[in-house]
Image: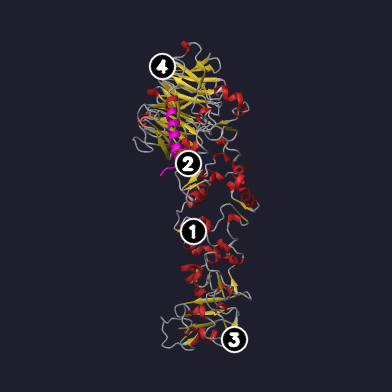
């Protein structure tokens, strides 16, 4: 059952919202000027742009661009020539001015974009009629991003095309329809804070995209009620994140926040100041003055959004004169009431503290309820209804009325924790840059610790892990980056929880101490062979196993170039003979193999070789029933020549004669005896062979 305080809150919220709806039918902005000063100087204007103290207007009917003084409304000059040829204007519609001091004009009569310099001299043009890349049908609007790339509203092709400042095609998004990301005769576009806002006029809505054209959200529907549209034809976003929309057939300007929530409106049908007949375009300058193209009234009306202290109830200022200074700060608490103070305060101080309408932050919830309390995890101050721990109630020089900037604000409560993180050798960039909200939501979240997304998706926003390769590290595949990495800071590089291989041993079995250990493991660097996140090769190897060893063992490149290569090496890389991590045998061999040149033979000394080769090579002095297909062809008749070399008190190990990797001589016979550097000459033929050089004079043998 609802308690008494909640019932009071709901009732007051309802009354406040109801009062807003009635109040907003009147103009809430001050008119500071009307252009032109001479009413005959302008006829059916459409596009508007402002540069310093000059206002540039497209005069569609006469095919010219007219320039007026912003302060007195006088016509200063005009440029453009009516016509169809190169550099001429047929039906100029929209206009934008770049940081490169170029003026871009959309011409819907010739389906193209023209570029002029600031004196009105023609520079170039791009586009022609059609539906291909770089072609237009009725380009009703254009806007420039911070790099002066040109976003063109290709209205009748129902798409947005993007070009570089010289008019070279970059990419396109949008198609005809009414689903998310589709358009029906879009008429205007605005760019702000890496977002693209499109007035989807035929669908009577506003759509928001990222700068690459990926759909984010939408708001609006057909109608004449608050928040509804009848041909939204112009759009602009102010430096305070407010979205201004020309609602043409309703003859008004509607204002929304970034979530698409209606805030207020001004204007109604009429010819008086502050009223409109077909408002076409809107522009907000750096001082947040609003320029509305009042098309059928043949004028540009300029409104101020600056707060003036005399807007406050004078009785409030009699006692609270100190508040005047607060309202000169950069960011003011938006007011829904003409008397400003009355939105939050009453003159009856018996209600709440300081005459607040509703106790504590319940007042804030009257505006921010839906946005603030609909998630599983709430920021502590919000859960305790103490918004003023983070926000000033009236004004601030910081965005969102914050008491302090960035991480300094978080330090009010989390100072000890944040200072501890900063002392570490490696600090997560958002913390070192003082921007906790890159990872954390300031108010609420569906994720623990108020994270902006589930762990892996959050990390990918900056680190771009694509998970596109065949083999993925288990924690990454499960979306748990924090198994290996600290989220805030670490004494280890890459914010690892532990240094080097120690972090691997959190999950993987520790490499036991052995007589011989692979060098990367000795150095505590598993990443010498393995990738830490994903790979196209099994076990997340950096390269396919046949090529991996070459990354460190450069001599292996020459080995593989020789005429004859040891079959295991050629077939499966090094791992048939060598362990990858550690071994009790030299050279990380998988089984016993003698190191010394002369060895007393025993049955276990050559276990490595006997994993593939037959033991009788070394143990049978006579090969019974010899024939040409016998397993060993190194024999003289039935006399086993391997036995003679190996199985005696001064037996020679295999590598005395054979190279274990490769050779240019058959049977992998060494080209020289390694220790004494004497060339070995070995010749094999169909009947046997002969050998000479390192150990004895030439000797031959026959099968």
**Relative image position of residue 439 (x, y in whole percent):** 53, 47
Q: Earlier in the sequence, mark 2 or mark 4?
A: 4
Kindly identify which numbered label has been placed on residue 581.
none
Disc number at residue 372?
A: 2
Q: In the rendered image, which quarter is residue 69 located in? A: top right
Q: Quadrant of residue 469?
A: bottom left
Which residue of the protein is positioned furthest toward the front in this rendering? 350
Measured in 3D between alpha carbons, the distance from the residue under mark 1 to the one under mark 2, in whole angstroms, is: 32 Å
Q: Please provide percent x and percent y for residue 429.
A: 59, 47
Residue mark closest to the camera, 3 vs 1: 1
- Under circle 1, the secondary element is helix
Residue, disc 1? 475
Closer to us: 613 or 125: 125
> Of the numbered discs in the image, which one, if any, rests on residue 270?
4
Q: CA distance from mark 3 to mark 2?
A: 87 Å
For label 2, count other residues whose C-alpha is less than 10 Å away and answer few (under 14), some (14-19) or many (20+).
some
Q: Report if the CB atoms under discs 4 and 1 are less than 8 Å apart.
A: no
């Amino acid at each position: 059952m609802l308690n008494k305080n909640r019932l009071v809150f709901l009732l007051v919220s309802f009354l406040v919202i109801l009062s807003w709806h009635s109040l907003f039918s009147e103009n809430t902005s001050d008119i500071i000027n009307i252009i032109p000063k001479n009413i005959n100087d302008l006829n059916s204007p459409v596009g508007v742009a402002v540069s310093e103290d000059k206002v540039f207007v497209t005069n569609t009917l006469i095919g010219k661009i007219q320039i007026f003084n912003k302060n007195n409304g006088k016509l200063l000059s005009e440029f453009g020539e009516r016509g169809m040829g190169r550099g001429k204007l047929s039906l100029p519609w929209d206009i934008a001015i770049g940081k490169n001091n170029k003026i871009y004009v959309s011409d819907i009569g010739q389906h193209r974009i023209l570029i002029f310099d600031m004196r009105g001299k023609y520079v170039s043009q791009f586009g022609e009629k059609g539906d291909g890349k770089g072609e237009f049908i009725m380009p009703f609007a254009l806007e420039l991003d911070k790099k002066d790339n040109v976003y063109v509203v290709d209205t009748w092709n129902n798409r947005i095309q993007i070009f570089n400042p010289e008019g070279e095609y970059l990419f396109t998004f949008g198609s005809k329809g009414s689903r998310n990301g589709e358009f029906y005769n879009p008429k205007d576009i605005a760019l702000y804070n890496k977002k693209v806002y499109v007035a989807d006029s035929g669908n009577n809505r506003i759509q928001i995209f990222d700068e690459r054209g990926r759909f984010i959200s939408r708001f609006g529907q057909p109608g004449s009620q608050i928040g509804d549209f009848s041909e939204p034809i112009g759009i602009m976003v102010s430096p305070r994140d407010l979205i201004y929309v020309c609602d043409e057939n309703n003859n008004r300007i509607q204002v929304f926040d970034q979530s698409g929530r209606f805030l207020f409106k001004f204007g109604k049908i009429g010819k008086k100041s502050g009223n409109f007949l077909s408002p076409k375009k809107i522009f907000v300058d750096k001082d947040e003055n609003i320029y509305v193209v009042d098309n059928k009234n043949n004028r540009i009306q300029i409104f101020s959004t600056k707060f003036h202290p005399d807007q406050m109830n004078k009785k409030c200022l009699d006692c609270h004169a100190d508040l005047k200074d607060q309202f000169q700060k950069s960011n003011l608490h938006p007011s829904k009431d003409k008397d400003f103070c009355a939105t939050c305060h009453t003159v009856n101080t018996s209600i709440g503290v300081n005459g607040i309408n509703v106790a504590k932050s319940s007042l804030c919830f009257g505006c921010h309820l839906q946005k603030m309390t609909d998630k599983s995890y709430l920021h502590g101050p919000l859960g305790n209804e103490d918004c003023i721990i983070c926000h000033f109630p009236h004004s601030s020089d910081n965005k969102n009325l914050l008491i302090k900037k960035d991480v300094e604000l978080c330090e009010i409560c989390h100072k000890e924790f944040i200072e501890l993180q900063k002392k570490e050798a490696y600090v997560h960039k958002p913390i070192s840059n003082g921007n906790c909200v890159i990872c954390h939501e300031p108010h609420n979240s569906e994720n623990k610790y108020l994270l902006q997304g589930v762990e892996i998706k959050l990390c990918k926003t900056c680190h771009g892990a694509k998970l596109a390769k065949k083999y993925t590290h288990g924690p990454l595949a499960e979306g748990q980056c924090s198994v290996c990495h600290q989220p805030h800071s670490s004494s280890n590089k890459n914010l690892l929880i532990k240094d080097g291989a120690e972090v691997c041993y959190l999950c993987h079995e520790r490499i036991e101490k052995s007589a011989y250990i692979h060098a990367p493991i000795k150095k505590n660097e598993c990443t010498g062979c393995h990738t830490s996140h994903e790979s196209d090769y099994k076990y997340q190897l950096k390269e396919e196993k046949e090529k991996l060893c070459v990354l460190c063992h450069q001599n292996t490149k020459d080995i593989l170039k020789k005429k004859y290569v040891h079959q295991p090496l050629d077939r499966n890389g090094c791992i048939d003979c060598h362990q990858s991590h550690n071994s009790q045998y030299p050279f990380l061999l998988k089984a016993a193999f003698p190191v010394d040149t002369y060895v007393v033979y025993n049955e276990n000394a050559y276990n490595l070789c006997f994993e593939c080769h037959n033991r009788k090579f070394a143990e049978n002095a006579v090969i019974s029933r010899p024939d040409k297909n016998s397993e060993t062809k190194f024999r003289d008749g039935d006399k086993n020549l391997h036995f003679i070399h190996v199985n005696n008190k001064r037996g020679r190990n295999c590598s005395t004669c054979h190279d274990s990797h490769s050779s240019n001589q058959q049977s992998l016979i060494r080209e020289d005896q390694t220790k004494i550097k004497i060339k070995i000459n070995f010749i094999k033929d169909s009947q046997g062979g002969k050998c000479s050089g390192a150990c004895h004079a030439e000797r031959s043998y026959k099968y």
